[in-house]
Image (cartoon, grey):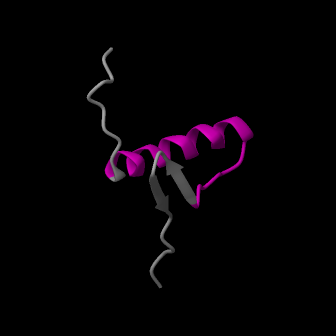
Amino acid sequence: MDFSKFELTEEKVKKLRPIFEKALSRKYGRKIEIAILTMGNITIRKEPPLQ
């Protein structure tokens, strides 16, 4: 597998966050939500729900 042309984008990080949350929730047996996720130089913050 060649990762030389792989570029991490904000959209890719947004797609990975629910995968990480699900894996951690299964491991620890309770619902885990990631508020801030940083990968490389990209930071994603969970937006509060609209009222």
Horizontally, residue 16 falls left or right of residue 34, namely left
Give coordinates of residue 7: x percent, y percent: 31, 38
Q: Kindly identify the residue that appears in the image at 49 percent across and 41 percent down.
A: 19
Q: Kindly identify the residue that appears in the image at 51 percent across and 74 percent down.
A: 48
Give coordinates of residue 13: x percent, y percent: 41, 47
The front one of 27 and 45 is 45
The dominant secondary structure in magenta is: helix
Indicate whether 36 appears above or below 22: below
* Magenta span contains residue 25: yes
Q: Kindly identify the residue that appears in the image at 40 percent across and 52 percent down.
A: 14
Q: Quadrant of residue 50?
A: bottom left
The front one of 9 and 21 is 9
Indicate whether 48 appears above or below 18: below
Q: Residue furthest left?
A: 5
Indicate whether 30 appears above or below 48: above
Q: Quadrant of residue 1?
A: top left
* Magenta span contains residue 32: yes
Give coordinates of residue 16: x percent, y percent: 44, 43
Give coordinates of residue 40: x percent, y percent: 47, 45
Horizontally, residue 3 falls left or right of residue 36, namely left
The front one of 3 and 46 is 3
Q: Which residues are magenta?
A: 11-35
Q: Kindly identify the residue that appears in the image at 48 percent across and 48 percent down.
A: 17
* Total marks in image: 0
